[in-house]
Image (cartoon, rainbow, N blue to C red):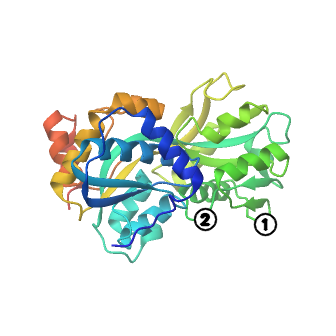
């Protein structure tokens, strides 16, 4: 089986080493089954999540070696899974459903190959700018230099959808920069971008870092625009970025987003997925030290946003711990 790995990068290795030191556990087991979990570019939240989960599983699940992989993003993750280059991936609830049904970006693929596993946290659309910059509202985006996210990432698709609902065309009504979040933050700081669009779980580490040196503004999404956005794309739902998550933004910022979590190939054995699910749940307190999103994961949240069936191994564990609504979920996603 081929591996899609860029962990030789010093940045990826550094983060993985840091996370390994934060998660408590015994030594890693000798591994017979090698699996990969796709995330996003180093510096994004999903990479931090993936590295933390891999460390927990490697220390607690015998005969499994799970490698956190840096990738171009969620859309690329699903395609790598479809190509049998990885077995697990971070995905939004929209991309998870499209992958299972082979629709949208995955039209033409085999249906039913990729199954739901575990919701972690919602992803929130961030409209990020500097307080002294020219963007105060969504109406100010016309004619601006806008970071849209990198090709292969879900954030770029979300940004394209958002700008389309605003009625703005790339290269005609604004200048798009299709780059990763870290580069967008650098562009804001250097004055080469006016605004950055990113749909991710907060806090976004590169944005937190930016607030240490620059005054950052999160642009709110008004109700009228959200209603148009949801009418065009029903999976999006209303949420807010909590106040004081980012320095200089004390009040909640209304926005929209998707559910965010993990999907897994149907080819991974049931008992392996059961053991990995159990390991994650039994180590949520240590994973919270890796990223605060894990502090909000519970049996009440693990099904949030998913529309594709659960992997049998995950279903077995969720039934065991009494996840609320699991039988209704099974009925709703059957067929």
Along the line of sight, the residue nearer the viewer: 139 or 11: 11
- Asked whether, in this view, residue 55 is left or right of residue 123, the answer is left
Precedes in sequence: disc 1 or disc 2: 2
Residue 218 in view (yes/no)? no
- Asked whether, in this view, residue 203 is left or right of residue 101, the answer is right
Question: Horizontal and vertical percent for residue 75?
Answer: 49, 62
Question: Horizontal and vertical percent for residue 61?
Answer: 23, 46
- Which residue sits at x=56%, y=47%? 44
Q: Say the numbered circle drawn on residue 171.
A: 1
Q: In terms of image quadrants, where is residue 85?
A: bottom left
Residue holding disc 2: 151
- Which residue sits at x=74%, y=61%? 176
Residue 266 in view (yes/no)? yes
Secondary element at image label 1: loop
Mark 2, residues whose alpha carbon is within 10 Å: few (<14), some, or many (≥20)? Answer: some
Quick check: 147 above or below 319? below
Along the line of sight, the residue nearer the viewer: 241 or 78: 78
Q: Nearer the viewer, mark 1 or mark 2?
A: 2
Quadrant of the frame with the C terminus? bottom left
Secondary element at image label 2: loop
Along the line of sight, the residue nearer the viewer: 255 or 186: 186
- Which residue sits at x=60%, y=65%? 151
| Label 1 – label 2 distance at C-alpha | 16 Å
Quadrant of the frame with the N terminus? bottom left
Q: In terms of image quadrants, where is residue 264?
A: bottom left
- Which residue sits at x=17%, y=55%? 270
Circles 1, 2 touching at the beta carbon (< 8 Å): no
Question: Horizontal and vertical percent for residue 170?
Answer: 74, 64
């Amino acid at each position: 089986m081929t591996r899609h790995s860029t962990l030789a990068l010093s940045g990826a290795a550094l983060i993985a080493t840091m996370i390994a030191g934060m998660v408590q556990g015994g030594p890693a087991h000798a591994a017979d089954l090698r699996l990969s979990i796709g995330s996003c570019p180093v510096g994004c939240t999903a990479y931090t999540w993936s590295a933390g989960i891999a460390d927990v599983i490697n220390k607690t699940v015998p005969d499994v070696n799970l490698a956190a992989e840096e990738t171009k993003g969620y859309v690329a993750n699903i395609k790598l899974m479809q190509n049998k280059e990885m077995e697990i991936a971070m995905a939004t609830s929209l991309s998870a459903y499209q992958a299972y049904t082979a629709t949208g970006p995955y039209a033409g693929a085999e249906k039913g190959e990729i199954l739901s596993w575990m919701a972690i946290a919602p992803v929130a659309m961030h409209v990020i700018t500097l307080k002294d910059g020219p963007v105060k509202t969504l109406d100010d985006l016309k004619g601006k230099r806008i970071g849209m996210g990198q090709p292969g990432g879900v954030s770029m698709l979300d940004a394209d959808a958002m700008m389309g609902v605003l009625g703005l065309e790339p290269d005609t009504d604004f200048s798009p920069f299709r780059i990763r979040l870290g580069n967008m933050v650098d562009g804001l700081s250097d004055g080469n971008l006016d605004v950055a669009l990113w749909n991710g779980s907060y806090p976004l580490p590169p944005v937190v870092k930016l607030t240490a040196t620059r005054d950052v503004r999160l642009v709110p999404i008004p109700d009228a625009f959200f209603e148009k956005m949801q009418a065009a794309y029903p999976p999006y739902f209303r949420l807010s970025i909590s106040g004081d998550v980012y320095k200089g933004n004390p009040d909640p910022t209304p926005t929209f987003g998707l559910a965010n979590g993990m999907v897994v190939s149907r080819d991974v054995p049931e008992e392996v997925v059961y053991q990995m699910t159990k390991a994650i749940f039994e180590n949520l307190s240590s994973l919270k030290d890796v990223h605060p999103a894990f502090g909000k994961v519970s049996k009440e949240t693990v099904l949030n946003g998913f529309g594709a069936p659960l992997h049998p191994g995950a279903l077995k564990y969720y039934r065991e711990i009494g996840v609320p609504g699991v039988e209704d979920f099974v009925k709703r996603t059957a067929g």
